[in-house]
Image (cartoon, grey):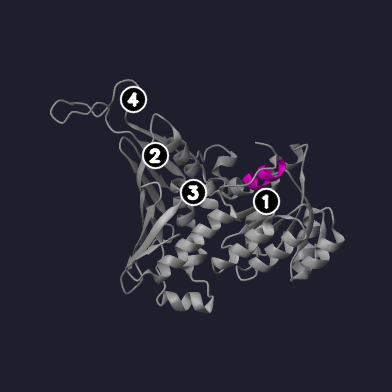
Amino acid sequence: MSYQRDFKQRIKAAVIGAGSHCYRNILPSMTYLPIELLAVCDVNMEAAAYTAKQYGCQAYKSSGEMFQKEPEIEAVFISVGAALHPSLILESLNWGRHVWVEKPICLRASQIKDMMEKRGDRVVVAGLKKAFTPAAEKARELIASPEYGKLNSILAVYPMSMPEEGKTVLENGSMPNWLRNGVHPLSFMIGVAGHVDSVQAIVNQAGFGAVLLQFESGVTGTLHLASGPQPDAERYSLFADKWQLDIEDARVSLRRGICDFNYRGTTSYISPADRGGSVVWDTNSCVATLENKAEFVQGMYGEMKYFCDCILEGRRPELGSLEMALEVMEVYEAALISEGKVVMLHS
């Protein structure tokens, strides 16, 4: 692990939006990134000034003034309300800056197409952190390996409901929890299984039920919209012919079954050598390592490091890209208007 002071090459950056989320998550994550923070911008000048003083940089109330007075800024990290994200992204791109933006990137999928037109050669990454978790990385590793290979289906469980009158939600430009937090499980599923062909939402009158995804790869996905007393009841299971990956909190379990299982002849649940059985990865709370921090477990560090790497290496992002953000938003919108029917994407 490298810390900010360890990097020989650092990106000159600014933060737009110094609210609670940025202060608790984005700024602390920069401790481990190749970043030199030049400015903090927020309409709340008191918060901007206090934060800028803490980080040894300049404070601004206006992003336009910041860009004008800080020509060395190469990249911006934007974390305000979703309704303001599009205009700030476009402004930053017009100034020729690379952009990382917190989720949700916008309120309507069509807004992303404007960003694509203005992007040029700039790096733009959306904060779809669940696609950058260590668990998601492990899932992609397994799917790509010749030993494990093809994924068949995904089950995601997330505590939320589908809002009533989905078409009205889209027309009014409101931001229900299905957008605010629904992007998390959708980001994980799309980040692992790829492009989505169709969406179908089947829910009861209370809005609980399932969103069914059919992926271009042939994978089927079920996002269970769960009710219950536990707000943290988030988990994922990935199923293949010879393996299953279960993810609950920070624990990742690879279940490989009993090697050479025979219903009539197998007498032991323990496979020979290290074949079969389960492999479990978990954080170690007894050791003061960074793996236990939410920034790392939940993907915040991963998405921001990926953004920085793309800038420094001069490559176009794939995970968290505008294309991926557009797909997440299209699935979000399709589920709202589904009403139990299959909605085809890219038809």
Q: Which residue is mark 2?
A: 253
In the current view of this chain or complex, which residue is farthest to the front? Answer: 347
Magenta-span inclusion, residue 212: no
Q: Nearer the viewer, residue 343 or 247?
A: 343
Q: Which residue is mark 4?
A: 275
Q: What residue is shown at x 40% (from left), y 69% (from top)? A: 162
Q: Amino acid at mark 4?
A: Arg
Q: Is residue 16 left or right of residue 276?
A: right
Residue 191: mark? 3
Q: Are marks 2 and 1 in contact (CB under 8 Å)?
A: no
Residue 104: mark? none
Estimate the x, y position of residue 309 in percent, counting from the top left.
67, 42
Kindly indicate the quadrant of the structure image that contains residue 296: top right
Q: Which residue is mark 1?
A: 123
Task: Give the magenta part as a residue range.
Answer: 305-312
State which tag comes first along the sequence, 4 or 3. 3
